Amino acid sequence: MMQNSSLAPPPATAGAAPLPGQRPTWLDRSLADVPSYVAMVAVAFIFLTPFIWMFLTSFKPTVDVFRYTTPLSVWTFIPPAPTLENYVSIFTTWSFHRDLLNTLIAAGGQVTGALLTSTLAAFVFSRMRFPGRDVLFAFTMLTAFVPFDVVVVPLYIVMRSLGLVSSYWALFLPFSFSPFGIFLMRQSFLEIPRELDEAATIEGASLVQVFWHIILPNTRPALVTLALIQFMWSWNSYLWPLVIMQDPNKQVVQVTIAKFRTIANFPLFGELFAAATAATIPLLILFFLLQRYYVRGMLVSGMK
């Protein structure tokens, strides 16, 4: 039986719009995505430009920082005479490595405390039933809307009463309780079927074993997301370390950066850009290493 060639669809032309009933080729799909790629590259360029300028300017002497800003040229970004004197100055004269270590200790303490309290509280709010549970959870969430400027004085009085002023404990202890962390972990815990808890309980597991062996292993993306957010919050904090830390040897990077001044109170822009770059690099490395867990954690926690 001869096949009627006149009824067969004509071959697709690369780049042309597909005919009705014809599946688009990979080239058609790629060309359709070009406007989206152009828009994303433009937005990324807008957001990355300040960081690129900060990084490249950190290799300029202070006298050259603003010399080529008007009119804009390639020398606005690229240093005409690259130098490492700014980095040498912040690590030798200003002992910036000590501030980085102090910030790392404070951030590590805050992450540890927030993970511990948030997971335990979220387990109670998501798995246990008791009178007033929802009211208590709503009250906990309301505390997230209290501005930090309102509670900074009471927090200082509490820390002074405990004898913790100018200690590492004071840098992270008040932030070991996180309403946002409780909300994030509770949403993640709700995604785990209760049948797993009941099956483990029938097998003789206790609540602690259910929490440790069932709940936590199934919420790793949310745990990493919470740890990453808490680390960034602690790393970028300025007001509380400025208030509570009176020992310059235990100060954090954000406060130290604000103090880059000459004797005549003139900002040391070269050292300032170098310190800002040195303080940003750990966050970028951490984010690029954990970004896939961060995205999954935010998606899972937002499903309910």
Image (tube, rainbow, N blue to C red):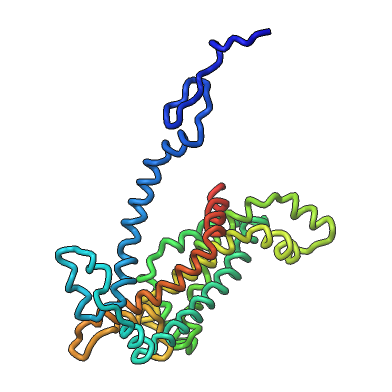
Residue 136 in view of the camera: no
In the image, 149 versus 44, the foreground residue is 44
Q: Is residue 203 above or below residue 89?
A: above
List x then y, in percent, for residue 63.
Answer: 19, 80
Q: Is residue 121 left or right of residue 57?
A: right
In the image, 44 versus 131, the foreground residue is 44
Residue lying at 44% horizontally and 82% vertically, measured from the top left = 100
- Looking at the image, which residue sits at the far top? 1
Q: Is residue 302 above or below residue 61?
A: above
- Looking at the image, which residue sits at the far front? 2
Residue 77 position by quadrant? bottom left
List x then y, in percent, for residue 218.
Answer: 67, 57
In the image, 129 versus 102, the foreground residue is 102
Q: Is residue 148 above or below residue 109?
A: above
Q: Is residue 291 left or right of residue 263?
A: right
Residue lying at 45% horizontally and 68% vertically, measured from the top left = 284
- Looking at the image, which residue sits at the far right? 203
Q: Is residue 15 left or right of residue 293?
A: left
Residue lying at 44% horizontally and 87% vertically, measured from the top left = 98
- Looking at the image, which residue sits at the far left? 71
Give the quarter of the figure containing the N terminus.
Answer: top right
List x then y, in percent, for residue 189.
Answer: 63, 55
Residue lying at 17% horizontally and 73% vertically, measured from the top left = 67
Q: Is residue 48 above or below residue 149?
A: above
Total of numbered circles in the picture? 0
In the image, 159 versus 71, the foreground residue is 71
List x then y, in percent, for residue 5.
Answer: 57, 12
